[in-house]
Image (cartoon, rainbow, N blue to C red):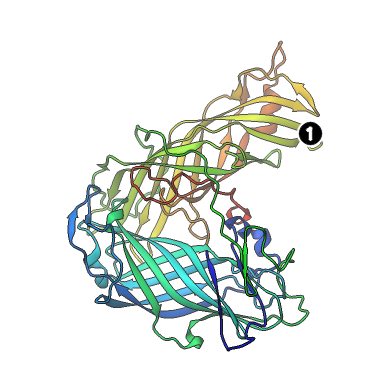
Amino acid sequence: MTAQRRQGGGRGSVARSLRVAPIASVVLAAGLLSGPGSHADEGQPTAQIAYDCAVPDPPPTTSDPSGGATDSAGGSTPSAGDSTVRASVRIGTQLPLTAAPGRPIRPGTVTVEAALPFDGLAGLLPPGANGLASDGALGVRIQQGKASADATWSGLTADAAVPPSDGAVHLAATGEAPTITVSDAGDVDLHAGSLALKLTPSTDGVPATASSFTLTCAPADKDPATTRLAHISVPDGSTGTGEPSASGAPDSRGTRRDGIAVAPQEDGPTGASTCGPAPTGVPDLSQIPDPLPGTVLGPLKPQPGIRACAYAVGLSTIKKLDGSMVINDPAKEPGLMNVRASMQTQGSIAPGPFYSRIDNLGELALPDAESTFLGFGFTPVTAKASFENEQITISTGTIGSSPNAKPFAVATFLQSLRLHDVEVNGTPLDVGPDCRTTKPYRVTLRGDFTSTTGRYINVLSGGILKGMVDIPAFSGCGTHGEDLDPLFTASISGPDNYIVMNQAVTCLPDFPGTPQCPPVIPPLPGDEAR
């Protein structure tokens, strides 16, 4: 996200400084949202704004190996002769009502919901396209008196099925916004500016990246009263919401220009340079949700699939021990999940209820997890856990038609757990080389579409998946005739053990220019995912 200084009014007009700094998604944990600088307990400010969007002319088409039509330039951008469509855009933030000088103001999770007339876009879609992904960026003017700064709220991604049942393409995107820091008292207003939407068609989950096109949108009414996103009161000496700032200046990597400091946005850490081979096998469909009664399903349609990979990190909580361990620790050397994306699809046949599903296959070799907890509530126990995973099936789709359509995302696989390198109160406990669960247990994680963050739309965009597992009894624990099976079974085994995973956006190494390559390591899921 970027910010640029702009001043108005004339000589000496910059009486205050504004600072726009990036904020990582991890700060959206519930503990921070309910603390200083948030609007979690005050209601979410929203604005409904009409935008006029320039639509590019359909480009000359050639054959696209991914199954769609392309233009030789690799995408379309608006030109002087383009037509326009009217979009209805709802923008929501978690901005506070009050703030204090020198303390970061957190917009929190930004939601941008755009409704576009499908007729105005249909001519730009390749034949057979049934999906549309968007990557949006919203310009925002931050105004305090005569001082102002421009911020870009980017990374606003969304997906929609096409053609829509009601004639409008609905794109509901969420993303993170940079913090805002003002050095002096004075009311602050945020106004929506230009909106750019890069749209990429897809067919059965396979993106036609060469057929992407960009809509450049501007508010239809330039009246500030219609574009205002939020009004924040910053009284002199206020104890309003905000987080103490270590300094009014940016850190050593930032810059300062005429009283407005801009800190750089950091990219996420990366691990492997590219993906491994795509998995082969048969997806496990035992955990997918049922279609609506009366749905007539068409045949399964096998696809070659897309070679992809992504990092997924998370937490596993052992209910009996009331403790958690980090799974695939992002601070160390996490394992990379290799994926065959869109390897098969299945959909409904009209005139019954709508159903659409895309199946993907993944393989993830997890490194050992380390955990320290209090055994029996008072004795410190340290152990390493090895997780042995079978292939992972990830299925995403939609049940029913708009406005009652229900998306779903489910990942399922079998897993075994082995314990080793156990210490009790600092003293090694020899559990032997084969202290493990008596049988593999099923792990099924699902997306939560009631949440405003981390929604798992498809395997390409990633997101949060969570669920409960039932850990079986242990066997093979102990040496020299000592049977430790009952100890570990009593301490660990049982139902309602919570797992939450955060999967990053996938890298598609066979599509040059695809973002998120090398694959990015995501942060651990925060409290908002629990």
Q: Is residue 165 above or below residue 328?
A: below
Q: Position of residue 298 (x, y in %)?
A: 24, 48
Q: Nearer the viewer, residue 145 or 347?
A: 145
Q: Nearer the viewer, residue 296 or 77?
A: 77
Query: Quick check: 347 left or right of 287?
Result: left
The answer to whether one can see residue 294 in this image is no
Q: Nearer the viewer, residue 174 or 491?
A: 174
Query: Quick check: 415 left or right of 86?
Result: right
Q: Is residue 140 above or below residue 28?
A: below
Q: Position of residue 514 (x, y in %)?
A: 38, 50
Q: Is residue 513 above or below residue 61?
A: above
Q: Is residue 284 above or below residue 226?
A: above
Residue at 17 percent across and 55 percent down: it is: 62
Instruction: Quickly name the residue at label 1.
Output: 380
Q: Position of residue 63 (x, y in %)?
A: 18, 52
Query: Quick check: 113 left or right of 186?
Result: left
Marker count (numbered): 1
Crowding around mark 1 (Cα neighbors within 10 Å: few <14, some 14 to 19, many 20+) is some
Query: Quick check: 311 left or right of 507?
Result: right
Q: Nearer the viewer, residue 308 or 149?
A: 149
Q: Amino acid at mark 1?
A: Pro
For residue 467, what is the image quadrant? top right
For residue 50, what is the image quadrant? bottom left
The answer to whether one can see residue 201 in this image is yes
Q: Position of residue 219 (x, y in %)?
A: 41, 81
Element under label 1? strand
Residue at 51 percent across and 87 percent down: it is: 225
Residue at 67 percent across and 80 percent down: it is: 16
